[in-house]
Image (cartoon, grey):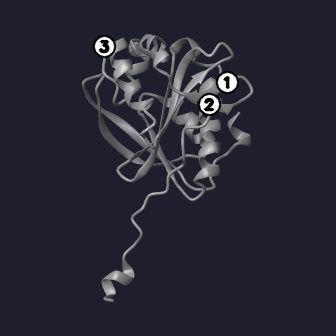
């Protein structure tokens, strides 16, 4: 055996398991269904929502939603993409924790008619809490466009730290946009202060 074999690290990435169903006080976070296409298209056809997202094009229509759903309802992925629903089970938003470039990333969006009600904080907190139980030693990365202080404030209340700034391309805006990078280190999730 040579020295190279002794220092080689295990390159396997731990996985959190299948997308769970999570109940909170007023929300159900669940795996997506193909029947969510119309509600997703309605939410993401609103430029006020898509302008804050990096990888969502504008305009956005039902076929875009179906293309995304086919991939995320196949059961083949390892990422968590959770539909945010209320008591009527209507899709009002998304919380995703996905593996990109070897790191877990948090992303989220909410239909504009549900903003400023604490729904996103409740949903993101619940998703991160469950993820942290399954993956306690894993950092979660995120961020927000510089002109989205509400999203950055939500992340900081939950325990994310700012790690830097960059520019990333926004498909909806069709330009590079300043982006504030954040990280939630293992054990740093603040549950009591996030309400």
Q: Earlier in the sequence, mark 1 or mark 2?
A: 1
Q: CA distance from mark 1 to mark 3?
A: 28 Å
From the viewer's perspective, is the residue at label 1 or at label 3 nearer? 1
| Residue 149 visible | yes
According to the picture, the residue beneath numbered tag 2 turns out to be 123
Q: Are marks 3 and 2 in contact (CB under 8 Å)?
A: no
The residue carrying mark 3 is 59
The first of marks 3 and 2 along the sequence is 3
Which is nearer the eye, 94 or 192? 94
Residue 176: percent from left, percent from top: 26, 32
Q: Are marks 1 and 3 in contact (CB under 8 Å)?
A: no
Q: Is residue 58 left or right of residue 115?
A: left
User: Are the two marked residues, 1 and 2, in contact with CB atoms closer than 8 angstroms?
Assistant: yes
State the quadrant of the C terminus.
top right
Q: Percent from the top left, x then y, of residue 120? A: 59, 27
User: Mark 2, residues whose alpha carbon is within 10 Å: few (<14), some, or many (≥20)?
Assistant: many
Asked where in the image residue 78 lies, by quadrant, the reply is top left
Where is residue 143? Give x, y as percent. Answer: 45, 40
Q: Nearer the viewer, residue 20 or 42?
A: 20
What secondary structure is marked by label 1?
Answer: loop
Q: Say which quarter of the image contains residue 122.
A: top right
| C-alpha distance separating marks 3 and 2 | 26 Å
Q: Where does the N terminus fall, quadrant-wise?
A: bottom left
- Give me the residue at 41% from left, 24% from top: 69
As drawn, the label of residue 27 is 1
Is residue 60 shown to the viewer in this render? Answer: no
Identify the residue shown where x is 65% and y is 26%: 28
């Amino acid at each position: 055996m040579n020295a190279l074999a002794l220092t080689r690290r295990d390159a396997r990435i731990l996985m959190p398991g299948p997308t769970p169903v999570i109940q909170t006080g007023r929300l159900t976070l669940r795996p997506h269904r193909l029947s969510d296409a119309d509600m997703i298209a309605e939410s993401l056809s609103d430029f006020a929502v898509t302008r804050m997202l990096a990888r969502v094009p504008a305009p956005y229509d039902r076929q875009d939603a179906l293309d995304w759903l086919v991939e995320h309802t196949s059961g083949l992925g390892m990422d968590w993409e959770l539909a945010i629903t209320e008591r009527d089970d209507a899709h009002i938003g998304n919380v995703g924790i996905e593996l990109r470039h070897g790191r877990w990333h948090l992303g989220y969006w909410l239909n504009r008619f549900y903003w400023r009600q604490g729904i996103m904080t409740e949903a993101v907190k619940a998703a991160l809490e469950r993820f942290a139980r399954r993956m306690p030693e894993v950092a979660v990365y995120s961020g927000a466009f510089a002109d989205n202080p509400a999203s950055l404030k939500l992340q900081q209340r939950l325990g994310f730290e700012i790690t830097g700034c960059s520019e990333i391309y926004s498909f909806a805006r069709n330009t590079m946009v300043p982006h504030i990078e954040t990280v939630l280190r293992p054990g740093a999730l603040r549950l009591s202060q996030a309400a």
